[in-house]
Amino acid sequence: MRTPNPTIAMSFVQNLLVGAARMLAPDAIDALLRQAGIAPTLLKQRGARVTREQFVRL
């Protein structure tokens, strides 16, 4: 039986980015998200989640 991959609520990503937004331009934050494999549009999607790997990369 396969174990499900854990996911993390987008609110954790949003909270992590609050500090980054104080020092970085919005384009730079979008670039960080893309490098982590997270589409910037997901930040505004209700119920969106990211994988543990994506969160760690971010």
Image (tube, grey):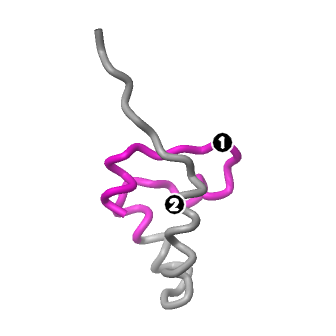
Closer to the camera in the image, 35 or 15: 15
Q: Measuring 60% from the left and 44% from the top, which residue is drawn there?
A: 48
Question: In which quadrant is the N terminus drawn?
Answer: top left
Give the extent of the magenta segment: 32-58
Hey, which quadrant is residue 51 in on the image? top left
Residue 49 coordinates in the image, percent (x, y):
53, 44
* Mark 1: amino acid: Gly
Residue 13 is tagged as 2
Residue 17 coordinates in the image, percent (x, y):
52, 72
Residue 58 coordinates in the image, percent (x, y):
37, 63
Q: If you read the primary sequence from the N terminus, does the residue marked by circle 1 or circle 2 appear first?
A: 2
Q: Measuring 55% from the left and 88% from the top, which residue is drawn there?
A: 22
Residue 7 coordinates in the image, percent (x, y):
45, 40
| Circle 1 residues within 10 Å: few <14, some 14–19, many ≥20 | few
Magenta segment: does it hold 48?
A: yes
Q: Measuring 49% from the left and 87% from the top, which residue is drawn there?
A: 24
Closer to the camera in the image, 44 or 19: 19
23 left or right of 1 in image: right
| Circle 2 residues within 10 Å: few <14, some 14–19, many ≥20 | some
Total residue callouts: 2
Residue labelled with disc 1: 47
User: Alpha carbon of mark 1 to alpha carbon of mark 2: how far?
Assistant: 12 Å
Hey, which quadrant is residue 47 in on the image? top right
Residue 24 position (above or below residue 8): below
55 left or right of 57 in image: right
Magenta segment: does it hold 55?
A: yes
